[in-house]
Amino acid sequence: MLNWLSRRYFCTAAPRPWLFVGLGNPGDKYKGTRHNTGFEMIDAFANSQGIEMNTVHCKAIFGQGFVGGVPVFLAKPQTYMNLSGESMGPLAAYYKLPLNRVLVFHDDMTLPCGVLRLHPNGGHLCHNGLKSVIYHFRGNREFPRLRIGIGRPPGQMDPKAFLLQKFNATAQGRIDAALQEGVNILKVVLSKGFAESARRFNSEQKYKHLRVETLPT
């Protein structure tokens, strides 16, 4: 698996790479569901940069390329959400990446639909995919995340059922816009670094949060 990009990174003074990982569930059954927005963000970024997701590595659909001269590895674990760490742990170890260069994309019910947040670290927020990732990082929570708001379940709806539902047309429109926003900020992360990107982006997203938090999802 040590191909041209990997050899170029290890054998030259190229910038240290990033590993972007989207969390989700594999298979057509789960495509387009709320719990798969991490996968959708990876696909949106890969498509925008012409990176092919055409190999399997460490139990993940995998692609790699350069964005503005920065090496980027993209992964969608195929272990199912609750076992995401079984893929992510070996991936980070294989490329000898510090965890602050492993950026995880995941759905977040605590944010309104279509609102994004960049965070440098944190807990699992009762997200089973993040629980698995933290476990396989030996309890280390010091990895950045791109949180993708999907809104809360209406009424007394079971959160698990809500996560496995597809978006309605209105919510899908917000998610599509959020994916494009995400692509843009990820390019800034690669060019300017995480801390500066998070400061700028989260400030902008606070205003969006105020606009959409009362709208239906």
Image (tube, rainbow, N blue to C red):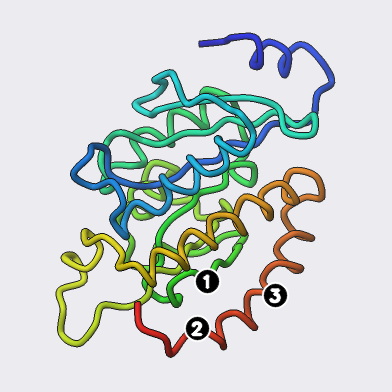
The amino acid type, in three-letter code, at marker 1 is Val
Task: From the viewer's perspective, tell me whether residue 117 is left or right of residue 43.
Answer: right
Residue 59 vertical placement versus 184 (above, below) = above
Secondary element at image label 2: helix
In space, the residues marked 2 and 1 are separated at their CA atoms by 8 Å
In space, the residues marked 2 and 3 are separated at their CA atoms by 13 Å
Q: Which residue is mark 3?
A: 204
Q: Pointers 2 and 1 in contact (CB under 8 A)? A: yes
The amino acid type, in three-letter code, at marker 3 is Glu
Secondary element at image label 3: helix
Marks counted in the figure total: 3
Q: Residue furthest front?
A: 169
The amino acid type, in three-letter code, at marker 2 is Val
The disc placed on residue 115 is: 1
Residue 178 vertical placement versus 152 (above, below) = above
Residue at (40%, 60%) from the top-left corner? Answer: 107
Q: Pointers 1 and 3 in contact (CB under 8 A)? A: no
Mark positioned earlier in the residue sequence (1 or 3): 1
Disc 2 or disc 1, which is closer to the eye? 2
Q: Give percent across and percent down for residue 26.
A: 27, 38
Disc 2 or disc 3, which is closer to the eye? 2
Mark positioned earlier in the residue sequence (2 or 3): 3
Q: How many neighbours does mark 3 have within 10 angstroms: few (below 14), some (14-19), or many (20 or more)? A: few
Q: How many neighbours does mark 2 have within 10 angstroms: few (below 14), some (14-19), or many (20 or more)? A: some
Task: From the viewer's perspective, tell me whether residue 147 is left or right of residue 197.
Answer: left
Task: From the viewer's perspective, tell me whether residue 30 is left or right of residue 189.
Answer: left
Q: Which residue is mark 2?
A: 212
